Amino acid sequence: MRDPRVPTIDLRPWLEGDEETRAALARTVDQALRTAGFLLVTGHGVESGLRAGIRRAAREFFLLPDEVKRHYEAKVGGRGWLGPGAEANGYAEGTETPPDLKESLTFATDEPFDDPVVNAEWYAPNVWPAEVPGLRTLCRAYLAHMARLEKELLSLLGCALGLRRDFFTRHMRHPTYGFNINWYPGTDLVGDPLPGQFRIGPHTDFGTVTVLDRQTGKGGLQVYTDEGGWEDAPYDPDAFTVNVGDLLARWTGDRWRSGRHRVLPPPTDAPAEELMSLVYFGECTPGTRVESVPAPVGRVAYPPVDSHVYLREKLDSITVG
């Protein structure tokens, strides 16, 4: 990917700098998100060893027999194991594709909510595989980092719009989130891809910001820009890939557009390639009214939506079967 469509942003000046330094970084972020909807973010403070530990533990689970993994089978948006064929993400944007070539372990918010109906739908307990007992501790440590990072990013984004820093974070008093560990095995396990089949089909994410820790590969992440079309995403092993989701795009009136992306199928010249991604989907408190900011900040006036009505419709749209 050619610079500067997806630039690398060091978060430390935002965390430690003076007001002038923070304002300069906010301007850079605003410009970047107008063009691609993606950033690489360093200076986040999450140790590489923690990320590697999650991958090792998750891989132990994914290599278990399917009959064991089925004990943890979940629906899309639930907690547990999503087996092969569970999702087709392209359907979220209206692109019909065969099911995605991946497996996932999926976790989410589990701190009880005061509304029993909302609590039942969005705050159910997580299901941690007994066969890999260390995964729970590792993921909880990682998710604590993600919660802090998400709020710092949203504070930065409020500033980047020229609005108050809590413009987004005030809707984060009891937020939901989704966390997927996506496993992309080679063709020895998934077989040869069907025409138009991807590890993850082309789509935009549904929430506020997505924080991705990824591995590079020939069958890896691609991002879409109006200027360049589909291009391999830039990679920095120390950086998180951060992209705008649909709710944030609607909030900003498409000043920042959702980052469209896909994950390529296993490559023909490296069919045994195996990758794993840690994907944190930032959301907000259920019942949040997402309404486009007016011009000159916003560009398009979307009708207001209930955040979690929108999220549920999107999750249902990618569910296979």
Image: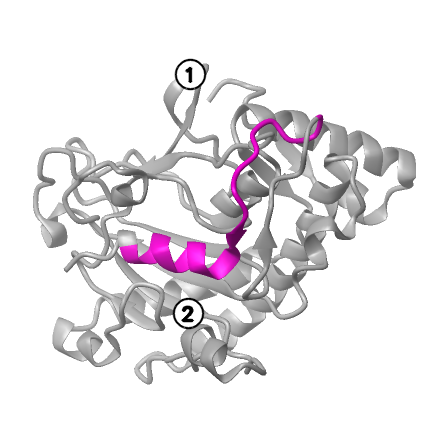
**Tag 2, which secondary structure?**
strand
Task: Residue 158: give x, y in percent of width and height.
Answer: 73, 43
The residue range painted magenta reads: 296-316
Residue at x 23% of width, y 74% of height: 73
Q: Which residue is mark 1?
A: 228
Classify residue 148 by image quadrant. bottom right
What's the residue type where badge 1 is placed? Gly
> Is the C-beta separation of discs 1 and 2 under 8 Å?
no
Residue at x 46% of width, y 65% of height: 53
**Tag 1, which secondary structure?**
loop
| Colouring scheme, one of rainbow, by chain, secondary structure, one colour | one colour
What's the residue type where badge 2 is placed? Phe
Classify residue 12 by image quadrant. top right
Residue lying at the far top in this picture: please name it.
227
Residue 213 marker: none
Task: Residue 157: give x, y in percent of width and height.
Answer: 69, 42
Instruction: Please determine whether, in this image, residue 253 is positioned above or below residue 147.
Output: above
Graded by Cα atoms within 10 Å as few (under 14), some (14 to 19) or many (20 or more), the crowding at tag 2 reads many
Q: Which residue is mark 2?
A: 107
Upstream in sequence: badge 1 or badge 2: 2
Instruction: Please determine whether, in this image, residue 257 is positioned above or below residue 225.
Output: below
Residue at x 67% of width, y 48% of height: 153
Instruction: Please determine whether, in this image, residue 158 is positioned above or below residue 119.
Output: above
Task: Residue 128: give x, y in percent of width and height.
Answer: 38, 80
Which quadrant of the rendered structure holds the C terminus? bottom left
Magenta stretch: includes residue 156: no
Question: Horizontally, is 191 left or right of 1 in the view?
Answer: left
Residue 16 visible at all: yes
Residue at x 41% of width, y 34% of height: 260
Question: Horizontally, is 52 left or right of 28 in the view?
Answer: left
Task: Residue 307: give x, y in percent of width and height.
Answer: 51, 56
| Front one among 62 and 93 | 93
